[in-house]
Image: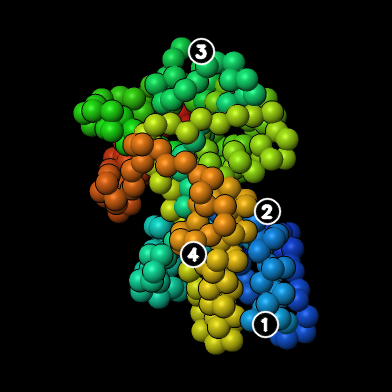
Amino acid sequence: MPKRTAAIALSLLAATLGLAACGSSSGGGGGKHIALVAYSTPQSVFEKLIPAFEATSEGKGVSFSQSFGPSGEQSRSVANGLHADVVNFSLEPDVERLAKAGLVSPTWNQNATHGFLTNSVAVIIVRKGNPKRITGWSDLVKPGVQVLTPNPFTSGGARWNVMAAYGAQLKEGKSPAQAQAYLTALFHNVVSQDSSARNSLQTFLAGRGDALIDYEDEAISDQKKGAAIEYVIPKDTILIQNPVAVLGKGSSAEAAKSFVDYMLSPAGQAIWAAKGYRPVISGVPGASKFPTPPGLFTIDSLGGWKAVTKQFFEPETGIVTKIEQSLGVSTAK
């Protein structure tokens, strides 16, 4: 068996086992089933969303299977054959991969929320009491500060982190060359790169490092659970926009669309907001608690994901690829 074929087969087996291991939820004997494949971070939110949806008339009798993991790996697994009816990824390109493969409608993001299910911002999580006195991006490149961020070649969250750090330098008036130099200095202070944002947070909570670049929602969620952490919202940071899409046709696709519609409704968005995600629609209870950073920017202001992916993450020439390789870090997907 050729190496590439064997690798794909192993990937599909692992993804399938992962899906089975994540369990399922059943609302009764209606016969409709939704296979949910998502990035790692929102797993605890779906524990609330799915029963809430099953309690509605549209969700009655719908059962679920769930798979969670690093966004890029999940997307590639679906492209390679892992069954999914709904995908919720960290990055827009992870859905675009499925659109190019004919698994998702090319018009998936032509709706009121532009295909996005949730928003967040990139923050810096620190130890309780903030012993290193970290207040922004400049503190992460100081000598002796140990930083955690996931590996950007497996984790969508890590790519948001990279672009947040880079874009913040431009917002501060630095040149692209100076912003690239900042990324190099930052990665020299990174002491751990797990495969996903969820795993990086667990490593940080276990005691590794002084600061973790992460989603705001992760920080809020674990702070509520009693973790000994605080978080800093940098003055200049990026708006994180997480996409959702429906796959397939027939009754499962109809049920999947109803589920997505529910998640985008005021009731669904209120559950997201309670878990620390910024709503993508107006009028959601709890939305006012999220402060707007003065220097908030979007990925579009940096050229959009297509241009950014080529410039920063191309396998041979990407800016971050070269930084990681110089440090001996894997850039394999």
Q: Amino acid at mark 4?
A: Val
Work out how far the residue at label 4 is from the one at label 3, CA to CA, in angstroms.
Answer: 39 Å
Distance, label 4 to label 1, CA atoms, is: 22 Å
Residue 44 coordinates in the image, percent (x, y): 68, 53
Q: Which residue is mark 1?
A: 57
From the viewer's perspective, is the residue at label 4 or at label 3 nearer? 4
- Mark before the other along the chain sequence, 4 or 3: 3
Of tags 4 and 1, the one toward the viewer is 1
Q: Is residue 311 left or right of residue 244?
A: left
Q: Residue lying farthest right?
A: 28
Q: Amino acid at mark 3?
A: Gly
Rendered position, 237 above or below 275 = above
Above or below residue 196? Residue 258 is: below
- Is residue 76 found left or right of 53 in the rendered image? left
The residue at 61%/41% (across/down) is 220
Q: Earlier in the sequence, mark 2 or mark 4?
A: 2
The crowd level at tag 4 (other Cα within 10 Å; few <14, some 14-19, many 20+) is many
Seen as rendered, the residue at the extreme top is 143
Residue 107 or 152: which is nearer the viewer?
107
Q: Which residue is mark 4?
A: 244
Residue type for callout 2: Ser
- Tell me which residue sits at (64%, 24%) in the image: 128
Q: Earlier in the sequence, mark 3 or mark 2?
A: 2
| Residue 84 locus on image (x, y percent) | 57, 70
Residue 124 seen in the figure: yes
User: What residue does disc 3 label?
Assistant: 144
**Relative depth, front residue between 144 and 27:** 27
Q: Which residue is under mark 2?
A: 44
Q: Position of residue 321 (x, y in %)?
A: 37, 37
